[in-house]
């Protein structure tokens, strides 16, 4: 039991530091100092920083996806267009609040693993979307996995440019157009 508590504590501290300082800028030394543990104790729980990043990123993804679906998950027969609008609004809101997560999704963080993280996020999103909205993403698209990847990548890129870089359009303009594009793709 104590071992799980210590691992949870390390993960929570790392998550906070990753969000505050960025993944690359946060060292194992900073994590262990903040946790008040020896560096060797860290390596009892994690083989390397990348393993901790994987765990933290997965947790953030799950929380982010829950946030996106919070108001529609238990409603019956939510129209697809309404669901898409809600999900886009909640995703943009989530990215605005957690810019580091958006940075992680947009950029390689180590060893060119970006696609691994996006793939996990996309798989979790697809499952939640299909179970919450009661439709399949396969409806009306050639290859649902590739199409969903393109939508997510486009969405993340547009949000990154608007939220992080502040260019070339405002997040309001981007959000409105993303909704329209996604509606057309899923028709």
Image (cartoon, grey):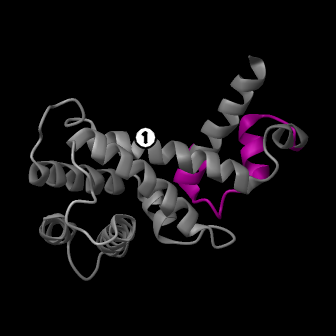
Q: Is residue 53 above or below residue 157?
A: above
What span is in magenta?
16-39
Give how far across and how far down residue 37 sits, in percent: 82, 35
Query: Is residue 173 left or right of 156 when viewed as pictured?
Result: left
Give how far across and how far down residue 137 sits, in percent: 27, 57
Callout 1: helix, strand or loop?
Answer: helix
Q: Nearer the viewer, residue 59 or 80?
A: 80
**Picture quadrant where residue 2 is located:** top right
The residue where tag 1 is placed is 63
Return the residue found at the far right.
40
Q: Is residue 125 above or below residue 138?
A: above
Query: Which residue is drawn at the image coordinates 25% and 39% (left, top)?
Result: 132
Q: Is residue 102 above or below residue 4?
A: below
Examine the structure image and report whether residue 78 is included in the region drawn in magenta: no
Query: Is residue 28 left or right of 22 when viewed as pictured?
Result: right
Query: Which residue is drawn at the image coordinates 18% and 54% (left, top)?
Result: 84
Query: Which residue is drawn at the image coordinates 52% and 72% (left, top)?
Result: 107
Q: Is residue 7 above or below residue 84?
A: above
Give how far across and how far down residue 10 sits, in percent: 70, 37
Local crowd size for mark 1, using a 10 Å CA cut-off: few (<14), some (14–19), many (≥20): few
Q: Nearer the viewer, residue 12 or 82?
A: 82
Query: Which residue is drawn at the image coordinates 86% and 44% (left, top)?
Result: 39
């Amino acid at each position: 039991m104590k071992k799980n508590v210590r691992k949870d504590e390390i993960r929570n501290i790392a998550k906070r530091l990753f969000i505050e300082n960025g993944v690359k800028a946060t060292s194992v030394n900073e994590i262990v100092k903040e946790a008040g543990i020896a560096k060797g104790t860290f390596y009892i729980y994690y083989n390397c920083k990348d393993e901790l990043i994987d765990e933290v990123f997965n947790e953030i993804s799950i929380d982010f996806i829950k946030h996106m679906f919070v108001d529609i998950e238990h409603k019956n027969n939510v129209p697809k267009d309404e669901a898409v609008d809600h999900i886009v609004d909640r995703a943009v809101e989530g990215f605005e609040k957690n810019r580091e997560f958006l940075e992680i999704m947009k950029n390689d963080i180590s060893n060119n693993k970006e696609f691994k993280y996006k793939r996990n996020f996309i798989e979790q999103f697809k499952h939640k979307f299909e179970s919450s909205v009661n439709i399949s993403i396969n409806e009306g698209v050639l290859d649902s996995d590739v199409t969903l990847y393109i939508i997510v990548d486009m969405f993340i890129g547009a949000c990154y440019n608007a939220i992080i870089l502040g260019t070339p359009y405002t997040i309001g303009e981007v959000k409105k157009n993303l909704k329209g594009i996604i509606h057309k793709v899923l028709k």
